[in-house]
Amino acid sequence: MPERMELLNQGAIKLGITLTDQQLDQFEAYFHELFEWNKRANLTAIIEYEAVQVKHFLDSLTIWLTARDALSNAAVRPVRVMDVGSGAGLPGLALKIAFPDIKLALVESVAKKTAFIRHVVEAIKLEGISVYTGRAEDLARGKDLRDGFDLVVVRALAKLPLLLELGLPFCKTGANLVALKHAGDGSEQDEAANALSELNGFIERISTVQLDGLTDDRVVISVKKMASTPARYPRAVGVPRKRPL
């Protein structure tokens, strides 16, 4: 019989991340909570044990490819991480399990999903987590959140120009937004040129994901924030999606 979270554990090792038995137990418990809640809440289309390990948990940990400095420093200094559009808690909760010293905030607009996130946080006994039910366009106006994070992560949410407008306002100047994307033909990065200029960011690094089960053209894009986001951004709810920069 396969060991628990074997695919995740082996993939993490290839990334250079060591997961303890306790952390693997937490991922196992996270999977079971996701499986049970998904029967009534429709949190994700990917729910098979092997697929969740690779396409949810391991995929989330690929943020390490471009954000290892921030994540590894959490043990020696406070590191605030925000997950925008967290869905069922990914990639944020996977990062929190793997790097328990980070201070994590999760933003999700759908109440049933934030209810699940709060349940999982309690069930697997995670600490140092804040959960916000609301739209990023509104929450980015809050003085305790705007310009407040050392790392902002986004996964499978939207095209890059929209991700930048929703996520960069939460970054401190000099901090990074990391997006998990599919590379395509590179045109999406080109289309983000205006957004990068408007929002004072630049693409610092693009890392290709080369792990078993994640070979479908996945990349990790790291955008550094060079100066404060202009106060007019993000625009009102719905506008960034309808009229991307």
Image (cartoon, rainbow, N blue to C red):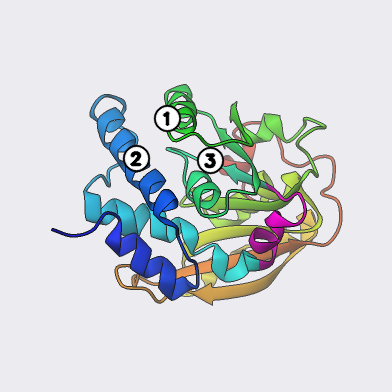
- On the image, numbered disc 1 is attached to which residue? 123
Q: Is residue 70 magenta?
A: yes
Q: Find residue 215 and report its horizontal and vertical position in percent.
A: 34, 73
- On the image, numbered disc 2 is attached to which residue? 29
For mark 1, give the secondary structure.
helix
For mark 2, give the secondary structure.
helix
Q: Are marks 3 and 2 in contact (CB under 8 Å)?
A: no
**Residue 212 seen from this side:** yes
For mark 3, give the secondary structure.
loop
Q: Which of marks 1 and 3 is in front?
A: 1
First to last magenta residue range: 69-80
Viewed as shown, does residue 46 lie left or right of 66? left
Q: Is residue 172 above or below residue 129?
A: below
Amino acid type at mark 1? Ala
The residue positioned 34% from the left and 40% from the top of the image is: 29
Q: Quadrant location of residue 42?
A: top left
Identify the image quadrant of the N terminus. Answer: bottom left
Which of these two is toward me, 202 or 37?
Answer: 37
**Residue 194 seen from this side:** no
Q: Find residue 7 and report its horizontal and vertical position in percent.
A: 29, 63
Q: Residues within 10 Å of mark 2 (few under 14, many from 20)?
A: some
Separation (CA) of disc 3 from disc 2: 22 Å
